[in-house]
Image: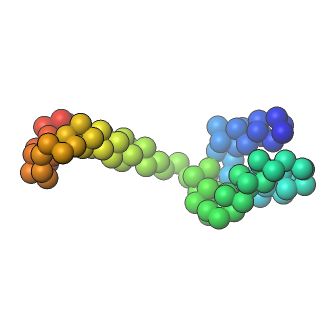
Amino acid sequence: MTGHVRSFAQMLTERQGERLPQWLHAVRQDDLPGLHTLAAGIDRDGDAVIAGLTLPWSSGVVEGHVNRIKMLKRQMFGRAGFALLRKRVLLAE
């Protein structure tokens, strides 16, 4: 199991999405139910996973803004409507 995890980590850090099909095949050959579940999840979104492992683009900046807006929304839960939330989001930048 350790070898598979390290190999997957190397694919992530070195952005080697082209190795993913071989990695999935190797995981399925071993009797590791936890990794079989991971492999099944990767298969469901295979194109997206390969794109994430190979393409240089990231949605990290957008995710950061969404996270910040959700935090502001949680802080204001039940206290104000959309107008005040909008003002807080715009002023928090």
Q: Outermost residue, front direction?
A: 78
Residue 86: where, in percent of width, then height?
A: 14, 48
User: Is residue 41 rendered to the left or right of residue 61?
Assistant: right
Quadrant assignment, res 6: top right
x 39%, y 46%: residue: 63
Quadrant assignment, res 10: top right
Q: Is residue 6 in view?
A: yes
x 19%, y 40%: residue: 76
The quadrant of the image that shows the N terminus is top right
Q: Nearer the viewer, residue 8 or 54?
A: 8
Above or below residue 10? Residue 62 is below
Q: Is residue 14 in view?
A: no
Quadrant assignment, res 36: bottom right
Name the colouring of the figure: rainbow
Q: Nearer the viewer, residue 41 or 14?
A: 41
Residue 38: where, in percent of width, then height?
A: 71, 52
Residue 33: where, in percent of width, then height?
A: 81, 50
Q: Nearer the viewer, residue 82 or 20?
A: 82
x 76%, y 39%: residue: 5
